[in-house]
Image (cartoon, grey):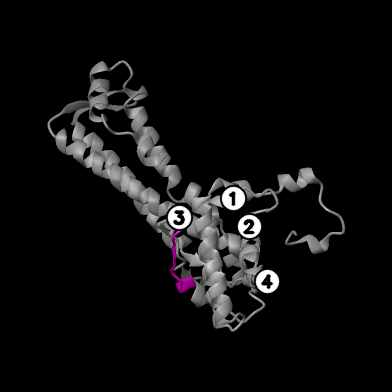
Amino acid sequence: MKMWSGRFRQPLDQRFEQWQRSFPFDQKLLPFELAASRAHALTLRAADVISAEELNQILAGLQEIGQRATEQSSDFLDNPEVEDVHHFVEKKLVELIGETGKKLHSGRSRNEQIATDLRLFVRESINNIRLSLGDFLGVLLVRAEENQSTVMPAYTHLQRAEPVLLSHWLLAYFQMFWRDSQRLLDCAKRVNQCPLGSGAIAGAPLALDRTIASRCSTCCHASRIHTGIALHTSRRGTKAASSGDDPCERIAERRGLARVEKAERRVDEDSGEDYEGDAAAVAVLRASRMGIRFDKFFH
C-alpha cells in the first residue's frame, strides 16, 4: 500500500514507479530517520496523541528496526516495494507492532522528515570530516617539526622565487586546512536547527511542542554512533524550516567542502606540476609527504 495510493484509481506504470524510488540511496539516512521518529513519538506522547503503552511499543519497534538493519543489512533492507526511507520505517513498524505503528505519522509531513534527516546527516558528516581534518593537521605538524632545517625553493609564477624552510611550506597548508575546519564548524551551527513540528508548510495540525523534539537526544545502537536530535529549536517560520535551504548544498558548495578539496588539489599541484623539472624540489616534497595519504583522511 502506497502512502499516497488513495489519490489514484489505477496503479502507476512500473517503469515510472521504479524511477521515482529513492530508497536504494536514501536508506543511508535510516539511523537519522529512526532518531527523528523517536523524537516525534515523544512529542506525540506529550500532546496525549498516543498513550504511554503505545509510546513504548513504537520505541521498541524503532529500536528493533535499527538492530535488524545492522545485523541483517542487505537482506532486511532489500524491499522493492518501499519508495523511500520514510515509507520503509512506517511499513516495517506496522509489521512489527501493528496498527499502533501508523500513529507515528500523526502530525508530521514528509517535508519536515527529510529536512530533519538531512540536517542530522550533514551534522554528523561535518563532525566526521572535522575529525579527519584534525588527524591530518596533526600529521602536518609532525612533518613540519621534523623539517625545521630543510630548505626548499618557493615558487611563484611557475618559477623559483626564494628559499624557504620546508616546515614553512607545510605550515601554510596547516593554516589553510585549519580555516576549512572552522568554516565547517560555522556550517554546523547553521545546520543545527530542528524542522520537526513544521508540517508540510504551515505547521502541524496537532498542538505539538516543537521544543521537545529539538531537545531529544537518543543513541542509535544500530549504527553505534550518536544520532540523537539535540538540535536547536528553529526560530524561523515553519515553511522556511521544512522547505528552506538545503543543508547538503550548504556544506558541499558554500561552507567548506569545496575549499577542503581546493586545498587538497593545491598540495598535489605544489608537489607536482608547479615543480616540474625541478628534481631537487620534487624530491624534498615527496620525502616530506611520505606516509601522508590524502585518501585516508578525505575519501
Q: Residues within 10 Å of mark 1 (few under 14, many from 20)?
A: some
Callout in the foreground (4, 2)? 4
Residue located beneath label 1 in the image: 77
Give the spatial CA distance, label 4 vs label 2: 15 Å
* Callout 1 secondary element: helix
* Circle nearer the N terminus (2, 1): 1
Residue 244 is at least partly visible in this image: no
* Callout 2 secondary element: helix
Q: Which residues are magenta?
A: 214-221
276 horizontally vs 191: left or right: left
| Foreground of the two, 229 or 164 | 229
Residue type at mark 1 is Leu
* Circle nearer the N terminus (3, 1): 1
Residue located beneath label 2 in the image: 88
Give the spatial CA distance, label 2 vs label 1: 8 Å
* Circle nearer the N terminus (1, 4): 1
**How far across and down, in percent of the image, does residue 246 sit?**
56, 56
Residue 73 is at least partly visible in this image: yes
Residue located beneath label 3 in the image: 223
